[in-house]
Structures are given as structure tokens and as C-alpha cells.
Amino acid sequence: LDGDDNLISPPVKTNGVDELRTVLMLSQVKIVDDVSEIESNCDEAYISKKNTLSGCTIGVTKAEGEKCARCWFYDTDVGKHDLPHSDVCQRCNGAIEAWEEAKGEKFVKPVPEEEKEPVA
């Protein structure tokens, strides 16, 4: 079983266009050798075997991990490292750090406005 978390050693999340998950705009991609792995991990309604030009079997399931507050990709490492912004993934932490360095100021997460009661 090969997954996107094993493409670079040590695993580092990048935004390279050559990464399949980035090109497809998916949180995670796993390439497996045996169709039975897809069948055991995905509901039948989310498996496509027929009419694929490549002859590949494709399965879809909910991504693992937490949702990154910046890019919205799901990542198993969100909040698990001692990073300045614990609610975003490694890649987004790097992007925020680059922005801070370029601007010479600290990123401050905007506080959401309170929802106002509808006027009757």
C-alpha cells in the first residue's frame, strides 16, 4: 500500500503539482495493488470498476484526520506537532510563516463576527 504520506522521506506535505492528491484536489490518495483493499475500505456505492478507460478500480471514502482551517484538506497531522498554528496543516503553517516573513508582521486569525438576530 502506497499513500501520499510516503512519497517523501521523512514525510513532508508539499504543494507540488506533481502530487496526485494536489492535482485532483483531494485530501488523500492511496494507490493499492489489490482490489480487495478498495472493497474492504469503501462502500460499494463509492466504488467504480466499470467503464474506466484505464481499467483501474477507483474507490472513495472519507479522508482521515482533521480539517485544516486554511486549505480545508483533511490531514492526520493537524494539531499533532508543536507548530505555531495548531489548527492548520504543515504545508499551511509553512505558507503562513512565509507570509509573516515577507510582510514583517505576525498573522492574526480574524475573530468571526457574532451572528445577528434576524429582524422580524
Image (cartoon, grey):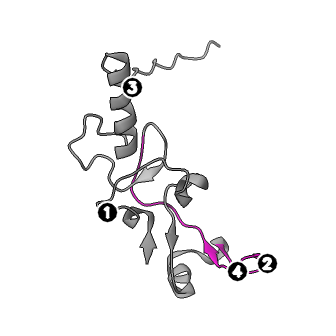
- Counting from the top left corner in percent of width and height, residue 119 is at 62, 12
- Decide which of 76, 52 is in the foreground and name it: 52
- The secondary structure type at the circle numbered 4 is loop
Contact between marks 1 and 4 (CB within 8 A): the answer is: no
Q: Amino acid at mark 4?
A: Lys
- The secondary structure type at the circle numbered 3 is helix
The residue singled out by tag 1 in the image is: 9
Q: Amino acid at mark 1?
A: Ser
Residue stretch in magenta: 47-68
- The secondary structure type at the circle numbered 2 is loop
Q: Which residue, as the protein is rendered here, is positioned at the far right?
A: 51
Q: Nearest to the eye among marks 3 and 4: give it.
A: 3
Q: Nearest to the eye among marks 3 and 2: give it.
A: 3
Let me know if residue 89 appears in the view: no
Please name the residue shown 49% across and 43% down the image. 72
- Counting from the top left corner in percent of width and height, residue 56 is at 66, 79
- The secondary structure type at the circle numbered 1 is loop
Q: Amino acid at mark 2?
A: Asn
Q: Amino acid at mark 3?
A: Trp
The crowd level at tag 3 (other Cα within 10 Å; few <14, some 14-19, many 20+) is some
Q: Earlier in the sequence, mark 2 or mark 1?
A: 1
Contact between marks 2 and 4 (CB within 8 A): the answer is: no
- Decide which of 88, 92 is in the foreground and name it: 92
Let me know if residue 34 appears in the view: yes
